[in-house]
Image (tube, grey):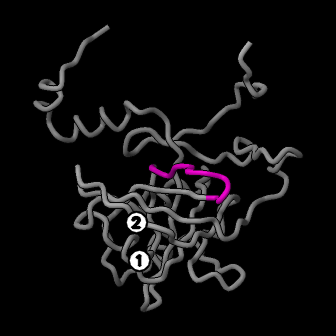
Amino acid sequence: MQKISLEEIKSWERFYRANFINCLTGFKPVCLIGSISNDGIANLAVFSSVIHLGSNPALVGYINRPIAAARDTIENIRATGAYTINHIHPEFVDQAHQTSAKYPAEINEFEAVSLEAVYENDFAAPYVAASKVRYGLQLEEIVPIKQNDTFLVIGSIHQVHIDSSLVQPDGFISLEQCKSLASLGNDAYYETTSVARIAYAKAK
């Protein structure tokens, strides 16, 4: 196997290095985060850093890039305390990816990429109508990560909207049935295939 030192990694061209390190951690969920400003301008942005933090209470986190690079989503969440996470499916992956473009704050990304926004049960933030798995969160905490000026944004699940056919009797969600996508690197999207569900492991 090839051995790559830290010194060599540091010497690489920055886009090559970013692609390599981003792929190294493996496939990740990729979602659209919907938010809204105090001025009523809806925002939509693609994120591949969404993580499960706990089930009781139900907490989900995501990593927000430095403010200079990705300001609108985190500022909207700070202002309103509400946001949505929406799974991406193959039929709108091109539009989802387009939200990674740097639109001015006064632009509604839902409209810019031709995705319909929907507001559910008086929840403040917009959902992606085409998403079959989507949930609304209330902001709990924003944790600065000083090593690279990013932020861990932690929210509690407030409501869930899901195609009921995906939910199994034990609560397991069969995401491969609705083709929720995964991502690799900054620009590659993948469908998933179930390999196995294995019973809870106990020491023998």
Could you classify mark 2 by the number of other residues whose Cα lies within 10 Å: few (under 14), some (14-19), or many (20 or more)?
some
In the displayed structure, would residue 204 be above or below residue 192? above
| C-beta proximity under 8 Å, tags 1 and 2 | yes
Q: Which label's residue is closer to the chain start, 1 or 2?
A: 1
Residue 142 is tagged as: 2
Q: Nearer the viewer, residue 184 or 76?
A: 76
In the displayed structure, would residue 75 be above or below residue 169? below
Q: Nearer the viewer, residue 74 or 92?
A: 74
Could you classify mark 1 by the number of other residues whose Cα lies within 10 Å: few (under 14), some (14-19), or many (20 or more)?
some
Q: Residue 43 falls in which quadrant of the image?
A: bottom left
Residue 150: x %, y % from top left: 30, 57
Q: Main secondary structure of the magenta part?
A: strand
- Taking the view exactly as shown, the residue that stands out farthest to the front is 203
* Residue 13 highlighted magenta (yes or no): no
* Residue 57 highlighted magenta (yes or no): yes
> Disc 1 marks which amino acid?
Arg
Residue 78 is tagged as: 1
**Residue at point 69%, 79% (across, down):** 120
What is the C-alpha distance between the residues marked 1 and 2? 9 Å
